[in-house]
Image: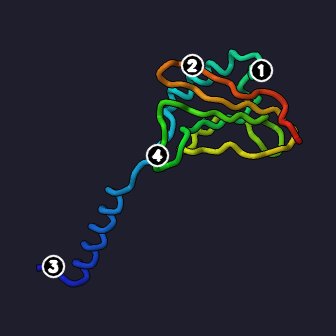
Amino acid sequence: MIRAGAHRKLAALVLALMACSHRTEEPMPDPQAVRRIEELLALQPCIGRLNRWHRSYFYPGSRKKSFKGMIMFDLKEAGKYGKVAGTEILSAGGTHELDHRPMLIASGSYDVARDTLTINYCGVNETD
């Protein structure tokens, strides 16, 4: 026979376990794919040394519906406006920050299946 206090604890434990089982992982790019993107980015004359960039990577779409065949990237000049050099892997949807301050930026995408990099923009952020 289970005592009343133990019954409440058991019920709380069951509810907690049920909540964990329904949790879905947020889709985030695989770190190995991000390393490959960074290898390709470092070869681009406009980007060069990665230690001068704050680099964000994410799947396009939303957390509920993302497209995992493509990885988006968004680079901001490190050392400007609090941006620190390094890699940041974000959940799906990520962010293309709307930031009109003058700094170097780069953005684009990586096609996972084709192993190809597309740079949409690389240069000084337009302030207009």
Mark 1 is surrounded, within 10 Å at the Cα level, by few (under 14), some (14 to 19) or many (20 or more) other residues, namely some
Circle 1 or circle 2, nearest the eye? 2
How many numbered callouts?
A: 4
**Residue at mark 4 to residue at mark 1: CA–CA distance:** 32 Å
Q: Position of residue 123 (x, y in %)?
A: 81, 28
| Labelled disc at residue 2 | 3
For the C terminus, which image quadrant?
A: top right
Q: Which residue is mark 4?
A: 65
Residue type at mark 1 is Cys
Looking at marks 3 and 2 on the same chain, the residue that comes earlier in the sequence is marked by 3
Quarter holding residue 121: top right
* Contact check, label 1 and label 3, Cβ < 8 Å: no
Left or right: 81 as drawn, with respect to 108: right
**Residue at mark 2 to residue at mark 4: CA–CA distance:** 23 Å
Q: Is residue 44 above or below residue 100?
A: above
Residue type at mark 2 is Thr
Q: Position of residue 126 (x, y in %)?
A: 85, 37
Looking at marks 2 and 4 on the same chain, the residue that comes earlier in the sequence is marked by 4
Circle 3 or circle 2, nearest the eye? 2
Secondary element under disc 4, as helix, strand or loop, is: loop
Left or right: 21 as drawn, with respect to 95: left
- Residue furthest to the front: 128
Q: Kindly identify the residue that appears in the image at 51 percent across and 35 percent down.
A: 29
Secondary element under disc 3, as helix, strand or loop, is: loop
